């Protein structure tokens, strides 16, 4: 099937709500490590896929899945070693008192379960979220996602949700020169929590990605989550850390994003990278929350925790550890960030380079002084870079941030080539 | 790891909301066809797993998954033939005007998306559902599931949902002797739909399994869905057929449950069997609904429609067709139903045997005249049968219905052995 035929059949058979990347979409037929290959065997460095965490088609992950598929794939109503082995290994990576696992099939299902838990445990019905947040594609997750409910086709903020400013030191309400920036942003929570009470919604939870992704590859200012979690706890709610996009070693210095803020959430949600592409997600919580959640209503998930998904999850986690991918994310990420930052000397279109490890953002502005977002340049660079064999994309409320979140197996050489190509393309644009 | 160790680790690491089957749980380590094997290699005929649709560990399904895992697993932002091939084959099985596919990772995600569509397309917020229905484990799905919201730990019916009686000819409001039984049950819809309007919720959808499963393996009376769909359409809502448990050839005479009622829904949701255990679900709708749903808000699902899931889905569908499993479901199912029905002559505890194809229920009663449910006998039989190597379980509002919904590869010989063993166990109990 050639690309035109596939596009024609997509138009005929798939929902029109699903868009393709790039003006001229790519036909990708093969993947290996940090590279994807099109139907003409042209290689692309995949700089945006935070799902293929240990690299596309990692042989060990495939072998683990295949071996288990040959033996058994059934539900958790029977005893099987894989689910407890995987839970044990995962929990070894989490700080006390996070000690109870639930397995699901996606990040959306994980955030759905976190919300079910938060409501059951607190008796509340209200949520506070960050502006521009995205927590998933299901109904409840959309209600928790200003990125969706305030975006195209959205029906606005639901009554049981309050939105606080995205802590965004580069272009937000308070900027990098404001002292105690994290605390200042968190100061919005008491008002939001009280307003929930006013409207008859006792606070159930504060949901936040530990490093906001769709918001534009944001690094939260120091002290923000400590203060925010303090406020939500004082109001009787729980703190949910959405690690779907940022957890699992990506930030380099730590295994989890929340650790960079020195907090321990009540509930952690996992998705995308943990199955390296296999539909897998998880929710991890404290014994106290797990016990309170067990109010008589069962939580059963047909596929969640099945032996094949757990074999794959186990293999991914083992590869992250044995191949030292967190350390690689730190080393390659820092070098890459330094390289990108150096581009600022020659390219005024770059307003800021930020991020941690292999979670990086390049923010494009029309004017460095006024910091006006420049989505056009960002989009143009993405299209040009694709022609050169680099896959990138944009995010942020104004679509002016190029996001870099590659498989963790990317090398220094890959990063250097990315910087060099970006340099040349920005030169052309200037 | 021995069973005691696994149980100990489950208590330590997994949420207490997840229960095991049987008083003495089984450790299942291997599956083949319609059989599961425990850690001592004891075989059990799996009479309840409607996920392992083409048989546990079907070699062709495994090979298809393995081959694709080796090549590529990424998202639908790039062109790839598998997703359109799978959509095409799936749509060949659906009547006009059902012609647009969306791929997700579970039945819960499918019903979440169906509800998103129903709301977006109708502008309504209200739903009518059948009593004792189960549509999934996410927040919205629980709101649509009296089985959950009226069950242990449930918080009752939400304001935007109205419940009509389960059409249940054996023990419901109207019984098998009432003329036009289907229409009579559907007569409840106008009141429920108007009550939704009264409470400020314009009707968005009527959700129903085409053969209610958790309700107790119910065969809807003739004419019910025709009349019910008519009422919901008249009120401006859409009709959603939940085929997660009953679709894909199981009912034998037809490929889909809704076909047995002579209707075409606006939206069909699929899950469990379509990936034979791989986390896979789908939503299929009309062009009109798909166009109206594309209101600017994108529907993107990270794992949904990936090349591996689609390769597996394709293989399952091909196996169903090439091995003639729908015909097998019809032939083995009819013989099994006749065998079970014959048991009624000797065992007064059986009040009714019902079902279609390999979707069967045995309802236990304390008294055939009064039809009082007998959950104790049903549970006892399930436990005893497990000791004899047959996996069964109970369902229905009163837990007095033994459900039979095995992989479609079960043979006449398997069915005969099941009937014989049931006969002996009922003899013991008498």
Image (spheres, coloured by chain):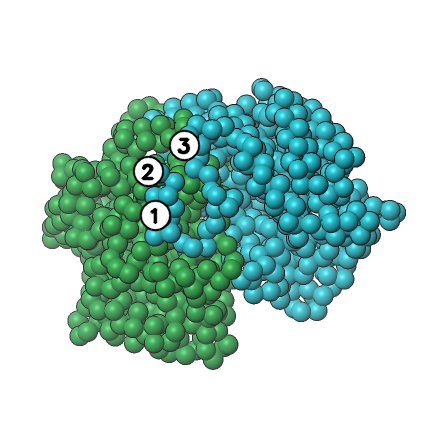
Chain colours: A green, B cyan
Q: Residue at x 83, y 46 (%)?
A: B176
Quick check: A181 above or below A13?
A: below
In the rendered structure, the answer to whether residue A32 lies left or right of residue B158 reads left
Q: Residue at x 60, y 50 (%)?
A: B134
Q: Secondary structure at mark 2?
A: loop
Tag 3 subunit: B
The residue tagged 1 is B9
Q: Secondary structure at mark 3?
A: loop
How many marks overall? 3
Q: Residue at x 23, y 37 (%)?
A: A319
Disc 2 and disc 3 in contact, CB within 8 angstroms = no
Tag 2 subunit: B
Q: Earlier in the sequence, mark 2 or mark 1?
A: 2
Disc 2 and disc 1 in contact, CB within 8 angstroms = yes
The residue tagged 2 is B1
Residue B39 - label: 3
């Amino acid at each position: 099937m050639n690309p035109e035929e596939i596009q024609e059949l997509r138009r005929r058979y798939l929902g029109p709500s699903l868009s393709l990347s790039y003006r001229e979409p790519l036909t990708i037929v093969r993947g290996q490590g940090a590279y994807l290959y099109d139907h003409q065997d042209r290689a692309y460095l995949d700089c945006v896929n935070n799902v293929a965490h240990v690299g596309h088609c990692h042989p060990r992950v495939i072998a683990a899945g295949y071996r288990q598929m040959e033996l058994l794939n059934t539900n958790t109503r029977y005893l099987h070693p894989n689910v407890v082995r995987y839970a044990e290994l995962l929990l070894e990576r989490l700080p006390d008192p996070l000690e109870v696992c639930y397995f699901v099939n996606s990040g959306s299902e994980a955030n759905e379960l976190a919300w079910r838990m938060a409501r059951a445990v607190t008796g509340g019905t209200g949520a506070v979220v960050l502006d521009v947040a995205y927590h998933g594609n299901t109904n409840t997750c959309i209600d928790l996602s200003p990125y969706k409910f305030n975006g195209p086709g959205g029906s606005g903020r639901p009554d049981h949700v309050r939105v606080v400013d995205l802590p965004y030191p580069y272009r937000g309400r308070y900027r990098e020169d404001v002292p105690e920036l994290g605390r200042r942003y968190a100061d919005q929570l008491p008002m939001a929590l009280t307003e929930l009470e006013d409207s008859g919604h006792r606070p159930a939870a504060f949901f936040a990605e530990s490093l906001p992704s769709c918001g534009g590859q944001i690094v939260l200012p120091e002290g923000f989550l400590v203060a925010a979690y303090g406020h939500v706890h004082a109001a009787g709610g729980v703190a949910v850390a959405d690690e779907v996009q940022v957890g699992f070693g990506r930030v380099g210095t730590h295994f989890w994003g929340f650790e960079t803020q020195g907090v321990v959430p009540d509930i952690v949600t996992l998705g995308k990278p943990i199955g390296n592409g296999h539909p897998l997600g998880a929710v991890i919580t404290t014994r106290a929350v797990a016990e309170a959640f067990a109010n008589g209503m069962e939580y059963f998930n047909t596929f969640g925790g099945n032996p094949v998904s757990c074999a794959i999850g186990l293999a991914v986690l083992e590869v992250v550890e044995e191949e030292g991918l967190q350390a690689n994310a730190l080393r390659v990420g820092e070098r890459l960030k330094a390289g990108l930052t150096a581009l600022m000397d020659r390219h005024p279109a770059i307003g800021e380079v930020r991020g941690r490890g292999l979670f990086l953002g390049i923010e494009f502005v029309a004017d460095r002084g006024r910091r006006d977002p420049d989505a056009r340049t960002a989009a143009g660079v993405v299209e040009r870079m694709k022609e050169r064999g680099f896959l990138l994309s944009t995010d942020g409320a104004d679509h002016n941030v190029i996001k870099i979140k590659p498989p963790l197996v990317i090398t220094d050489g890959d990063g250097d080539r990315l910087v060099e190509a970006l340099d040349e393309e920005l030169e052309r644009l200037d």
